[in-house]
Amino acid sequence: MLDQALDHTLILIDPRGRVIAWLMGSEKIFGYGADEMKGQTIDRLFTPEDQERGVPANELEIAARFGRCEDDRWMQRKDGARFWAGGVVNSLRGADGALAGFSKVLRDRTDTRGQLDVLRNRADAFAEEDRRKTLALGRLAHDARNPLTVLANAAGMIERAHPGDPTLVHATQMIERQTGFLNRLFEDLLEVVRIRAGRVVLQADMIDLKEVIEAAIETAGADVQKKGQRIEAAFPTAPIVLEGDDMRLKQVFVNLLSNAARFSKAGGLVSIKVTREDDEAVVRVEDRGRGIPPDLLPHIFELFTQGEAYEGASGLGMGLAIVKEYVELHGGTVQVRSDGQGQGAEFVVRLPLTRETVVPALTVPVK
């Protein structure tokens, strides 16, 4: 095996870093013969940059202290050509525990490095394309609001010019509802663009999470009442205070509650439970509605997902994308769980607590 293995190299090194055995595919991979390497340090196998940084000696030092040193890096052949190597240096010790030397095993992985570079370049290209699309959508949303404002004003003028006309009242009210709906969509889209462009600055202050969620319940209540649904909330007996932007956190929970109501049946129940787990505030929003297909779960927080996911769903699917962006701006996380279609869904928001306000919590229901 030592004579015939050509895709790996095995080098035995004494405690001073000098080669004492040049085995397996060492000559094929590096181009040096055994007579050229025995007694020499392993420095010449490294690139000039790594030699200047002291990488060869550092590898042996780490292996001597911790038993092994594993890394991937560019190495250099006899003719100066470079290749990407994945390898490990192990320390070798005698029965008395004294350091006897090192073994270095590596493999030429230039093909893998090339594949990684291709994938990285593709990922960068996709990210740039996504950035351009997001900015273009932002410009579209910004420009579209002007004609919508004109339409809404025109509807108001018609209504004032012909007060009491039942036909015109119905038409103008319909125009006002639809222009208002589009304005909200475009404002959501602009907010996503602002967040991704790094132009959103949190107005952070010390806030009581219960007060934020109660305000969200009041705002989302209109959507819930339309379908005869109800919201049940549970809070700790002691307050949970954290540093955050109360308006944006309120929007997080308005979006989650409205989303739960939208995909639940008439007369259904939406629950929101607040607890403390270690140094985090945890908010769970649960419904017993339509549920989420398994193939959609990894993409549920992506922009425009909703439009593809649910037949007949209104909106552009930006609500959950905004939830994710706002929560992450606060240093938190949001996850979703669903056992599939018809099994409901649970969204879990975790927000970091300030150390001064971490208190024990007992959950009591509040309707």
Image: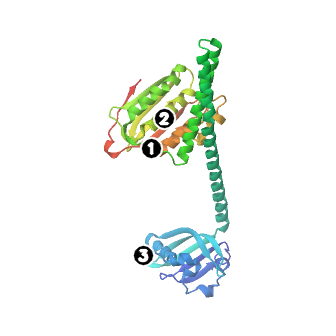
Amino acid found under the numbered disc labelled 2:
Gln
Disc 2 + disc 3, Cβ < 8 Å: no
User: Residue beneath label 3, please?
Assistant: 97
Give the answer, above or below, for where 69 lies relative to 13.
above
- Label 1 or label 3, whichever lies nearer to me, is 1
Q: Quadrant of residue 83?
A: bottom right
Amino acid found under the numbered disc labelled 3:
Gly
Q: Is residue 268 left or right of residue 110?
A: left
Give the structural element (helix, strand or loop) at label 1: loop
Quadrant (top left/top right/bottom left/bottom right) for the N terminus: bottom right
Q: Residue at x 66, y 77 (%)?
A: 81
Q: Position of residue 118 (x, y in %)?
A: 67, 60
Colour treatment of the image = rainbow
Disc 1 + disc 3, Cβ < 8 Å: no
Q: Position of residue 184 (x, y in %)?
A: 57, 32
Give the answer, above or below, for where 273 lies relative to 244.
above
User: Residue beneath label 1, please?
Assistant: 202
User: Residue beneath label 2, please?
Assistant: 251
Q: Name which of mark 1 and mark 2 comes first in the sequence.
A: 1
- Rounded to the nearest whole Å, what is the CA distance between mark 1 and mark 2? 13 Å
Quadrant (top left/top right/bottom left/bottom right) for the C terminus: top left
- Label 2 or label 3, whichever lies nearer to me, is 2
- Label 1 or label 2, whichever lies nearer to me, is 1
Q: Name which of mark 2 and mark 3 comes first in the sequence.
A: 3
Mark 1 nearby-residue class (10 Å; few <14, some 14–19, many ≥20): some
Amino acid found under the numbered disc labelled 1:
Leu
